Image (cartoon, grey):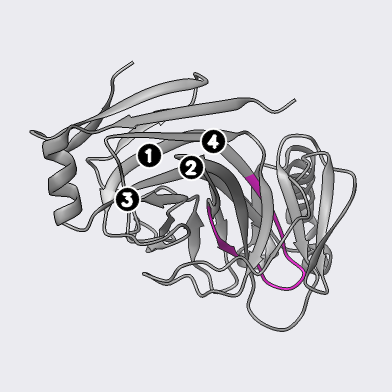
């Protein structure tokens, strides 16, 4: 049975006037980790015997745990990386949503964060949702300030015990999931596709759905998503759910969702949110 959550966000009148005059909106981002893998069968053909065992061992661990990324490096030896990042075919390393989009020591770049919910606030605002997620696909390029259009989505909430295939512009589920992540394989040729999780919420009584993350998945690749039960709340100039953001500001209130009901207030003097109770 799904767990229900409620978030209440409170502003005083002075703060509310300033926010509306500045054209700002309340923006909520959820953290989601992702892992992309490609088929590795053909990549083990000419591996030297001494290296083949390490490669197969790495690949086996990736299959068994589902939280490792194996990729070919020199002499086709496979290197394992933490599941919080994946290696694209262009050689770039990408990390889960919610990190700062800047080069790291390996000259890797982080994809922009995705605004789950964006709304113009009242003095008291109620956001309600459950821990149910939808898999979706989009052709919207992951560039700021694009707003993600959900082109296809699972008919109902996705199941961690299912493995999904995306073909003919629809998600087809079958048994075989590990019960710990949401998984889908891109089997559709044609346009560049991006996949992610989306979640429905009630904002002041109005039902809306917004993407939580978006990742490029090439034909034949599989992706796994793992929600981190963590949200960030801040003010921004974003205009709609699913807008690509440059980053999550350092002033954002970020916290783990450990309670089913949380009240957040805004401090006009410090221009920051805080947990009231």
Outermost residue toward the top?
Answer: 277
The residue pinned by badge 3 equals 120
Position of the C terminus by quadrant: top left
**Magenta run includes residue 215:** yes
Q: Is residue 33 above or below residue 264?
A: below
Residue 81 in sight: no
Q: CA distance from mark 3 to mark 4?
A: 26 Å
Helix, strand or loop status at disc 2: strand
Q: Is residue 160 above or below residue 117?
A: above
Position of residue 184 measured from the top left corner of the image (x, y, whole percent)? 75, 56
Magenta stretch bounds: 213-225
Residue 229 in sight: yes
Q: Is residue 117 or residue 91 the one in the foreground?
A: 117
Q: CA distance from mark 4 to mark 2?
A: 6 Å
Q: CA distance from mark 3 to mark 2?
A: 22 Å
Position of residue 119 measured from the top left corner of the image (x, y, whole percent)? 37, 50
Image point (81%, 70%), residue name: 187
Give left or right: position of 12 versus 252: left
The residue pinned by badge 2 equals 31
Q: CA distance from mark 4 to mark 1?
A: 12 Å
Outermost residue toward the right?
Answer: 175
Q: Earlier in the sequence, mark 4 or mark 2?
A: 2
Give left or right: position of 263 versus 237: right
The residue pinned by badge 4 equals 228
Q: Is residue 17 or residue 84 the one in the foreground?
A: 17
């Amino acid at each position: 049975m799904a767990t229900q959550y409620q978030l209440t966000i409170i502003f005083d009148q002075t703060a509310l006037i300033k926010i509306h005059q500045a054209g700002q909106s309340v923006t909520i981002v959820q953290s989601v980790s992702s892992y992309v893998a490609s088929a590795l069968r053909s990549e083990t053909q000419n591996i030297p015997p001494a290296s083949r065992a390490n490669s197969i061992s790495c690949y086996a661990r990736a299959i068994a745990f589902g939280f490792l990324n194996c990729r070919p490096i020199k002499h086709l030896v496979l290197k394992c990386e933490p599941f919080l990042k994946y290696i694209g075919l262009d050689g770039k390393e990408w990390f889960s949503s919610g990190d700062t989009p800047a080069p790291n020591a390996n000259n890797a770049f982080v994809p922009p964060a995705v605004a789950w919910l964006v709304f113009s606030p009242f003095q008291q605002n109620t956001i309600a949702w459950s821990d149910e997620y939808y898999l979706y696909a989009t052709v919207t390029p992951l560039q700021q300030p694009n707003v993600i259009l959900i082109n296809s989505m699972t008919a109902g909430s996705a199941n961690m015990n299912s493995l999904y295939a995306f073909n003919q512009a629809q998600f087809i589920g079958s048994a075989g999931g590990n019960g710990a992540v949401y998984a889908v394989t891109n089997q559709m040729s044609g346009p560049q596709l991006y996949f992610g999780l989306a979640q429905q919420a009630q904002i002041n009584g109005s039902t809306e759905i917004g993407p939580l993350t978006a990742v490029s998945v090439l034909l034949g690749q599989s992706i796994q998503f793992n929600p981190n039960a963590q949200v960030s709340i801040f003010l921004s100039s974003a205009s709609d759910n699913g807008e690509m953001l440059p980053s999550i500001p350092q002033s954002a209130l970020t916290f783990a969702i450990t309670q089913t009901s949380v009240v957040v207030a805004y401090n006009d003097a410090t221009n920051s949110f805080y947990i009231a109770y």
